[in-house]
Image: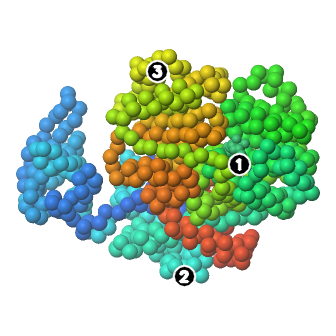
Amino acid sequence: MCKVLCIELVFILSILIIGLKVGVMNLLSSIDCLKNVGVKRAELYKKLNIYTIYDLLTYFPREYINCSESRTIKCVRFNEKNVVKARVLSKLSAKWFKNKKVFVCKVLAADEDEETFEIIYFNNTYIYSKLCVGSFYIFYGRFEKKPCGVSLLAPEVLQSVGFIPKYSLTKGLTTNILQSNLKQAILYVKDCCYILPRELILKYNFTDLKTALLNIHFPKTKQQYEKAREMFIFKELLCWQVGLLKLKSSVGLRNKSKIKDIDVNEFLNALPFKITGAQRRVIYECIADCSKDILMNRLIQGDVGSGKTVVAAALAFMFVRAGMQVALMAPTDILARQHYNTFCNFFKTFNINICVLVGSLKVKEKNKLIEGIKNGEYSVVIGTHAIFQDSVVFKNLGLVITDEQHRFGVKQREKLIAKGESVNILVMSATPIPRTLALIVYGDMNVSTIDELPPGRVAVSTYCVNSKMRKRVFNFLEKEINNKHQVYIVCPAIEDSKNNVQNVCCYANMLKENGFLKYNVGVMHGQLDAAAKNSVMQNFVNGSIDILVTTTVIEVGVDVLNASVIVIENAEMFGLAQLHQLRGRVGRGNLKSYCILISDLKSPDNKERMRALCDTNSGFEIARKDLSLRGPGDFFGIKQHGDVEFKIANLKRDFRIACICKKEAEHILALDKDLTRKENLSIKGAVNKLFSGDYVVI
Ligand code: ADP
Ligand code: MG
């Protein structure tokens, strides 16, 4: 709380210092200080999270309507909003419908080409009565094409020419009200106030704050609002990058782990295989981190099967040898147990105590483990997020490893770091993302890449077929099972779903009807309880289940070496990276393996995506393809930036600006690492504000 207050204070001060109106009223004054904003309207503003004059000024339009860009019916875009200049020809009808619940008014109008269409209003007699036959109006609304003709649904009637900003509003607040309040609010901004250092304003052709606000809320040209938007987006992304870079370089604790004196070869020589060059390089990158003053915060990305676990184990070995505890967090119980077995195996000659702490343990067992963790009896603690509950206290935690999917937000990282005197963090991710993207999104981390697979891996053969081929796919599955192999079938849904999407429960029955009666079919999905999930998974691992029909819960790292085929139904519903992850469930041993994608969607985009998977087995290649096909958006879905909520920036759209901001952020911090220079104060305040939210683990 105190910290948040401090952060707020810095922010307030910085705003004052950058020259905004100092006096009785300023940008941080409550919104009801404005003329025409009373208690009632202030309540409405609260619904939009607008409390201060500053909040109002930075409540940016979602989009703009260009009133002069009027279309004729011939060229309107159906099912989206258009501006159309039209003359009202006649008022057709006004009737109650559906038991007097809807009042429908219809108007006949003609566009500038004299083409006619119908305008329909629902429950809006006011507009209907105001429209005059014979007059021209500028309408803005959605057009629909029906067999009986073209209709325009509940359009707004625009009053002005030029650009009209559209805001997300709430009932009782109109664009006009907002704009009249904005006009007054802008007066509180001083004339020569800049939200970015002078150098950047000049370099990127930005303006002062007042001009930018006028241009974004009251634009006269498209260029005006685009440039103003760009400045605010730039400011936000710059602050984000500055914040991440500061985090990366300034964790206040000194790294006390003395692992550089430990010989990792003792561990590597005991392994049943020789590690790859990439694994060795990454291990040494981590060791170099841990020998520095600041704590390690490193992400290891590597394709499925690239052998990330052994890298983590090597580091764990060194920390344990240096007298510190290691915690490894997995996303599920099953994975935690699998890691436990793997670690026990790796460490069997070293007399290192390992325990696994998962939700399904009995309270008594759990308490015993917690006691052992506290007194240092266990050197390596493996589990789900349960290992970071308050009740779990470590004697001397030195390294936290998280596997798959989990990335800590800034707040979680702080909490973890507080679990020991010197806690280093290692994150393993099997969703490779292109380097340019990684550097932006993981700005607060160092990134290592394992870009080589262990030798002897047979590539998984991937095919894409339509559902008419399902029978043939089944024949193939039968052959594989008769050869004593196992099969995964992935469906998007759990239970009966409407829109023709395959679901786990019906699918299992369908298999029985299609000749699979004599085989063991298991069912797995997120709604089963932990014990049921565990037992199904155990039965699949030990080979007593032949076919596992499942949702994507099996996505993460489980190792079943005997599984040779994965069938993915409705493949179009999954992202490329996710399909690649799923494919990684097979081909983990040395069996020839197959991935069969079933999809009926014929769009060119889907075809190209499926082809990308059939053509390559490299996660990095697929990530690059995904980036070029769909832009960076999909990656942000998988690995979100997490910590911050942007007001105006959108990484998917503004990725180019984010790249520029990263460079500028580096430049700023190189010259002024604590942001104490006067020109950087507004950045400092905004950085603190951006990172002061309550963060969640992604
Ligand atoms: P992932 O990166 O997907 O987590 P794992 O760490 O689970 O991959 O490794 C996949 C399999 O490859 C494991 O069975 C592991 O023991 C094995 N493995 C890892 N590194 C090597 C290597 N250098 N040579 C041979 N096998 C390896
Ligand atoms: Mg793994």
Where is residue 126 shown, x and y percent of the image?
20, 47
In percent of the image, x 76 and y 41: which residue is there? 328
Judging by the rendered image, the residue that carries numbered circle 3 is 516
Foreground mark, 3 or 1?
Answer: 3
Asked if ligand 1 lies within 8 A of label 1, the reply is yes
Q: Residues within 10 Å of mark 2 (few under 14, many from 20)?
A: few
Compared to residue 497, the image places residue 10 above or below, namely below
Tally of numbered discs: 3
What is the secondary structure assignment of the residue under circle 1?
helix
Give the mark, 2 or 1, whose residue is nearer the N terminus: 2
How far is mark 2 from mark 3, CA to CA? 68 Å
* Left or right of residue 599, residue 150 in this image: left
For the question of whether residue 340 can be seen, the reply is yes
For the question of whether residue 32 can be seen, the reply is no
How far is mark 2 from mark 1, CA to CA? 43 Å
Where is residue 314 shown, x and y percent of the image?
81, 49
Judging by the rendered image, the residue that carries numbered circle 1 is 308
Q: For ligand 1, which image quadrant applies? A: top right
* Left or right of residue 136, residue 477 in this image: right
Where is residue 283 shown, x and y percent of the image?
78, 56
Where is residue 626 shown, x and y percent of the image?
48, 56
Give the amino acid type for the residue marked by disc 2 in the picture. Lys
Give the amino acid type for the residue marked by disc 3 in the picture. Phe
Compared to residue 46, the image places residue 510 above or below, namely above
Judging by the rendered image, the residue that carries numbered circle 2 is 203
Q: Residues within 10 Å of mark 1 (few under 14, many from 20)?
A: many
Compared to residue 679, the image places residue 183 above or below, namely above
Give the amino acid type for the residue marked by disc 1 in the picture. Lys
